[in-house]
Every structure is written in C-alpha cells, then in structure tokens.
Image (cartoon, helix red, strand yellow):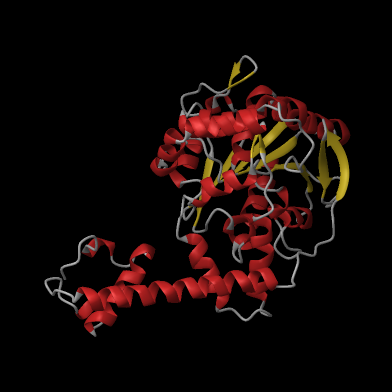
Amino acid sequence: MCFAGLTPWSVGSPLSKPIEQAIEEATGNSLGDVPWSEEIDPTLFLNALTRAGQDKLATFAAGISAYQGHGHRRVVSPPERWAEAGTLPILNYGGSPHGQPVLVVPSLINKAYVLDLFEDRSFMRALAARGFRPYLLDWTSPDHFAAETTVDDYIERSLIPALETIKRVHGQSAVLVGYCMGGTLTIAPAVLRPDLVSALVLLAAPWDFHADSEGLRHWLAVSRSGFEATLDSLGQAPVDLIQGLFAGLDPTLVGRKFRSFAAMDPESDGAKRFVVLEDWLNDGVPLAGPVARTCLLDWYLENTTLKQEWRVGATAIRPQDINCPTLAVIPSRDRIVPPRSAESLANAIPGATVQSVALGHIGMMAGSRADKEVYEPVADWIINAASQ
C-alpha cells in the first residue's frame, strides 16, 4: 500500500489508528486485506482521514464534558494529623499501637493522597489492617515551604526529623517506604542515618534518569533556557509546566482515556473511580525553584544520581552504602518511571530483593489489582524482614 509515513511496523500504534481507519474506508477493505502495493485515491483517503479525526475529537470532547459535569467526589475518612516534621504534617493511619512503625514517603510532584485514594483501595489503610503503624509524610501540601526550599531541606528538615520522631515515640526505627521520586529521596536517610531505618521499600523509584527517557531529555535540553527563566521569574515550576512535561511521556494517553470514559456508564463504579483519579491528577502542586532544578535538571538531564554526584550536605548519596534489608517493587508497564531506571537502583543496593509486577505507575498504588500484587506482598516482606 503506497502511503508515505505508514509502514508495516507502525500499524497498531495509537497514532496510526485514524490512518488505518481512513485506509479501510477509502479502499472498502479491512486493513489486513489491503496489499501494501495498492495505491489509494488521495481524495477518498483525505476525506476518510478527516472524518476519522473528527469522530475521535468529538468523542474526546464528550469525555471531557462528561468528566467535568460528573458529580462524584472522593470520600474517605481523614487520617489523624499525628505530628509535624519541620513544617510538614505526619499523618497517622492507625493500625496497632504497638505495631512496626512504617513511614511512607510520596512523590514530590503530585499530592500524597494517591496512597489513600479510596477507602477500599488504599496502601496506607492496607498497612494498618495488617497490624503495622503506618505514617504518611505529606510534603506535597502547598504553602509549607518557601520558594528557596532545596532537596536538602526536604531531607534534613522533614524526612530525617520524621524518622527521629517515630523512633523517639515508638522506641524503634521505622520501615521507610518511598513511592516514585519519594523513593529516590529515601535513599538519602538510609545512607545518612541508618540508625533510623530498619528496612527500606522502594516503589517504582527512579535512579538512572537516562534509562529509556530520550524524549524527555531532549525536551529538557532544548527548552532549558526557557525553563530556567521561568524558575528565575516565578521562583517555582508551576503545575501546568510539570503536567505538560510528563504528559509528553505518552502523548496519546489523554485522548485515549477520555474517549474511553465517554463510553462508560456514568453511574458505574469504574466511572466514579476514574473521576476520583482524574481529580487527583489535576490536583498537583508546584515545585520550589531549587527543588525543580535538582530533580529536573540535575537528575533527569544530567543523571547525577547514577553518576553518584548527588550530595546532601557533604555526603555523596551512594546506594551501595545501604546495609538494611531492601525491597524494590518495579511495575513492568510503567511509562513514568521506566523499569530500567528503577532496576538500576535495586541492582546497586547490596542484597536488595526485586519484585516485578505487571502494572503501571499509578495502577500499582490505586488500581484494581494493587491490593493483591503490591499491598499484600509488601506487607508480607516487611513482616519477614522484621523477623530476621
């Protein structure tokens, strides 16, 4: 079939779908029956492609409208504000008063409640139900840190003090659990203060920021001057800028998910969960300027973590210096943290256990299979690690 730009290897990709639909309409045959040598009438093809694009755009718009008009909202019983680490709250999710304390560290970019998105699909509540004493460091609450906040501040003024508070109250060190970039940050206290960390659990934690990230690195490289000008002007990386950056990791995702939502029964459980998850995705927080420079320029662009050039104070943060039991849970379908990025961290920690799950980055925490494939195995591993 003679059509420039559409080659056999591209068939089936999300971007090729409108073209495939147009070819089938223009030729009157299913795509599998059209020989690649057949020529297509350009007028018929263009008209068919236009209709295919219009149909997808109309369905996408219908999905957006249905989401915006949906009345369902997240409803969960709020956790107790147990203590503060610096200026940030430590949330207490109950569990056994004498259970093993677990401090969970969320990502920096989205709010922490993805770890407690639904009453029946909550990593935090699952830990409490297994008899642990789980705490969540909620450092993505807005307005707690000033624009000059650094990554060192997050670690030295909040993360380490939170661990110190837990050890003082419970008389034992905590299991430290980090999700996404929160997992990257947990490496620092595990290196700097091993007396405060009894075991370490890394959930999709990136380390080799150049692994399978050519597109993102190219975007950061070509736009670096504009990005830094924004940070200089605003003192922070705005939510829209961060969302646009990560949306580029899968450019067709937004269209696909809202077209799928348009076909859902709005009263179905799936539709209601979609709304709650989408509300969380759109409830981001800006990054303080120095934090954005470290995470997006030093880590993503320069890969200072893998090069062992990341320092907190005068100390190089090297995962090979970690000596506590460590579990790395790596979702094989992750588009935000490529599996090879997380694997590089697990491979660098002596004796680390690796568990691969066939889930995505958010699905591992809030998906329908998260309980069986992540919550329960992590709880079992912590129990075994504590008994050794």
Relative depth, front residue between 360 and 378: 360
Tell me: residue 48, above or below residue 185. below
Q: Left or right: 105 with respect to 242?
A: right
The mark tally for this picture is 0
At 46% across and 24% down in the image, what residue appears?
A: 307
The residue furthest front is 43
The residue furthest top is 314
Residue 187 is drawn in which quadrant?
A: top right
Q: Position of residue 165 (x, y in %)?
A: 84, 32
Q: Left or right: 47 with respect to 367?
A: left
**Which quarter of the rendering shows the N terminus?**
bottom left
Q: Position of residue 221 (x, y in %)?
A: 43, 33
Q: Position of residue 104 (x, y in %)?
A: 71, 43
**Which quarter of the rendering shows the C terminus?**
top right
Tell me: residue 341, above or below residue 359. above
Residue 19 is drawn in which quadrant?
A: bottom left
At 63% across and 27% down in the image, what residue appears?
A: 290
The residue furthest bottom is 28
Task: Decide if residue 339 is in sight here.
Answer: yes
Q: Left or right: 332 with respect to 80?
A: left
Q: Position of residue 317 (x, y in %)?
A: 58, 23
Relative depth, front residue between 156 and 230: 230
Task: Decide if residue 349 is in sight here.
Answer: no
